[in-house]
Amino acid sequence: MVFIQMDVHDRLGRNLRQLRHTQNCSQEELARKTGINRTYLSDLECSRRNPSIELIDRLAEKLNVKPGDLLD
């Protein structure tokens, strides 16, 4: 059996997208709520950026989850 481990950027991107969709929140809306550019949020969801711990905390707060939930 082969296990493919996602790196932390991939997990963050996947979880951000899933949570945002579950909450019927657009990229534009979440970006505005967290004070970042929509394209930056898109880059996070596509694993192209490295967010700060503070940004992970803000994203989690706006999505009503714990910061760790974004990385699991």
Image (cartoon, rainbow, N blue to C red):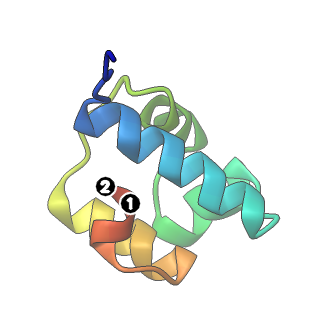
As helix, strand or loop, the secondary structure at mark 1 comes to: helix
Q: Give the residue at the far top of this rendering.
A: 2
Circle 1: is it few (<14), some (14-19), or many (20+) Cα within 10 Å? many
Q: Give the residue at the far right of this rendering.
A: 24
Which residue is painted at 17% across and 61% down in the image?
Answer: 53
Label at residue 24: none
Which residue is painted at 46% across and 53% down in the image?
Answer: 36
The answer to which of 23 and 3 lies nearer the viewer is 3
Q: Amino acid at mark 1?
A: Leu
Pinpoint residue 66: horizontal percent, then vertical percent. 35, 79
Tell me the quarter of the picture where residue 30 sits.
bottom right
The answer to which of 72 and 31 lies nearer the viewer is 72
Give the total number of marks visible in the rendering.
2
- Give the alpha-carbon distance from disc 2 to disc 1, as whole Å: 4 Å
The answer to which of 5 and 28 lies nearer the viewer is 5
Tell me the quarter of the picture where residue 48 sits.
top left
Q: Disc 2, disc 1: CB below 8 Å? A: yes
Which residue is painted at 50% across and 51% down in the image?
Answer: 15
Q: Amino acid at mark 2?
A: Leu
Label at residue 70: 1
Quadrant housing the N terminus: top left
Question: Residue tagged by mark 2?
Answer: 71
Relative to 50, is 26 above or below?
Answer: below
Which residue is painted at 75% across and 56% down in the image?
Answer: 21
Tell me the quarter of the picture where residue 33 sits.
bottom right
As helix, strand or loop, the secondary structure at mark 2 comes to: loop
Pinpoint residue 31: horizontal percent, then vertical percent. 57, 56
Pinpoint residue 28: horizontal percent, then vertical percent. 70, 52
The answer to which of 33 and 26 lies nearer the viewer is 26
Pinpoint residue 50: horizontal percent, then vertical percent. 23, 36
